[in-house]
Image (cartoon, rainbow, N blue to C red):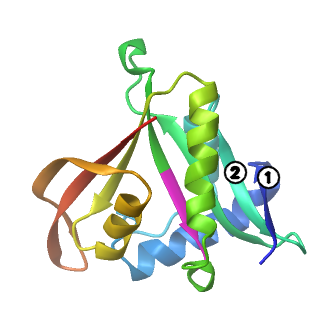
Amino acid sequence: MEYQFSKFSPEDRVPVIDILNYYIEKTFSAYQGVKADYDSFDDMLKKTKGYPAITVRTKSQTVIGFAFLKGYNPSELYNRAAVCTYFLKPEFTGKGIGKKIVEHLVDEGKKMGINSILASLSSVNERGIQFHKQNGFTDCGRFKGVRRKFSHDFDEVWMQREI
């Protein structure tokens, strides 16, 4: 499958939020309990300013996913750590695109002087946890029972990839 990465732009607002909303409404992968509105894309742009933020597009320019890094903590003492977020339309998972996204974020993070990429996952998202382990992340923390979605309590699992 042919695809390319493009820098976030205002034109990505609808497809990015639509992909995010799929995961909000149907999975434990996105923590929010309420659909995101299209204005929340502006918040994404603010949070990712100065960090890599991309859409994943097919050859025909259809947005099939998005990814970004953002600061872990606003204090400059933490400026070598970033948190990653990425989502693909479900029909495009399991095709190696996620691995390429991680590699891209790692490469871009290195250029910025980042030495640690963090990921926050739901403990019931076993597929996501396995994906991160296969891509060089290790467990680095767990907050037990701090999240609730779909009337289900779950842990927040933190994973880290040192780069």
Count residues near mark 2 (Cα–Cα under 10 Å), then give few for <14, some for 14-19, many for 20+: many
Q: Is residue 62 magenta?
A: no
Is residue 88 magenta-colored? yes
Of marks 1 and 2, which one's residue comes earlier in the chain? 1
Amino acid type of the residue that numbered disc 1 sits on in the rendered structure: Ser
Q: Residue furthest left?
A: 144
Tag 2, which secondary structure? strand
Residue marked by disc 1:
6
Q: Give the range drawn in magenta.
A: 85-89
How far apart marks 1 and 2 lie (CA) works out to: 5 Å
Mark 1 Cα shell of 10 Å, populated few (<14), some (14-19), many (≥20)? some
Instruction: Say which residue appears at 76% left-offset and 58% top-offset.
Output: 12
The residue located at (13%, 51%) in the rendering is 143
Report the residue marked by disc 2. Answer: 54
Q: Where is residue 133 in the image (x, y as percent from the top left)?
A: 34, 60
Q: Quadrant of residue 99?
A: bottom right
Residue 42, x across and y down, in percent? 64, 45
63 or 103, nearer to the observer: 103
- Pointers 1 and 2 in contact (CB under 8 A)? yes
